[in-house]
Image: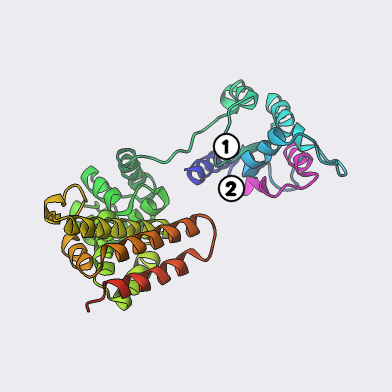
Amino acid sequence: MQDEHLRVLKESLAGELGGPEALDVVRFDGAQPTATMVADIFDECRSFGLMQQHKVVILENADQLLKKGEDEDEAPAKGRRGVATADVRRLMESYAADPSESATLVLRAASWRPGNLDKAVAALGERGAIIKCETLDAARAAGWAVKRAALRHSTTLDPEAARLLVAAVGADLGRIDNEIEKLALAAGGQGAPVTVDLVRAMTGQSREEEFWRLQSTIASGDARATLAHMREMVEVSRHDEVMLTWCFVELAKKVHAVRRLADAGENPAAYTGKLRLWSDSAGVFNAARRLSARDAAKLLDRTVGIDLANKSGRGEPYRNLETLAVEFSAAFAPR
């Protein structure tokens, strides 16, 4: 969303000034501040470019630079033209009250704490804007996909096809945009519409189905197949380690629950809905039969430990999961 709004801003400015060559883009990173960063930012905003008519000065991670100004009790020593970080937000507020006409200052942030700076920007009217770039839900992402297909890819995306696309690849707009580009080419170009059948053929199974399928592969006890399936999901489907870890945790919980139910004399099949045992139920039941309740508990504990390690920066996440996959396979392998 941030990239999209920035693109629209630069295209709008370029249109007013006669072309993209009229713009000079300068970037700073608030996560790695220097003693003179704030002064350098304002110098760029207030100075004229040698060739370009207008500057777009972008401060990445602006929340981190401004947060330091709020959180630090004592200001660090000033360098040449240096500014104490405790004054950063106040200086930004002052600049927002009277911004340069020859530059557009863009603050990009992962999070934001509203304050007087927001009021100063809002007071600028059309010269200032505060834009929330929040993750879209599935319905809004599908609506965005329909508009994006028409505006950027010269094709028509059926609303039902858009909903199917979001269900398959998720609400990440970058991923959706890439998929629309591929679908538009597959449709034949020249404005040919993207249909439901084409989306179904090109995007394959939904993300949820893909994760159920991985759990079935893990439960089979075949280490080679599990490692190959994991690599396919990372390199082809572009899933991250967080979702792969979720698969292992969910499977370990299900196997442990089924084993406990069986030892208590219950019929695990009666609990398929409560345990969310759908297409992977046979694999879970077979895996549970090969473990004692004690071993199932140890495997669950080990899985939670790997999850904690990945969230705490201990070890390389994907290598941790590969190790866990081998341990699962050893536990579930047919005797």
The Cα atoms of the two marked residues, 1 and 2, are separated by 10 Å
The type of residue carrying mark 2 is: Pro
Q: What residue is disc 1 on?
A: 16
Give the farthest residue toward the right: 80
Residue 274: image x %, image y %? 19, 47
Badge 1 local density, few (<14 within 10 Å), some, or many (20+)?
Answer: few
Give the farthest residue toward the top: 123
Residue 242: image x %, image y %? 42, 56
Q: Residue at x 42, y 41 (%)?
A: 135
Residue 129: image x %, image y %? 56, 29
> In the drawing, does residue 62 fall left or right of residue 205?
right
The magenta-colored residue range is 20-46
Q: Secondary structure at mark 1?
A: helix
Q: Which disc, if any, is residue 124?
A: none
Check if residue 208 falls in the magenta segment. no
Q: What residue is disc 2 on?
A: 20
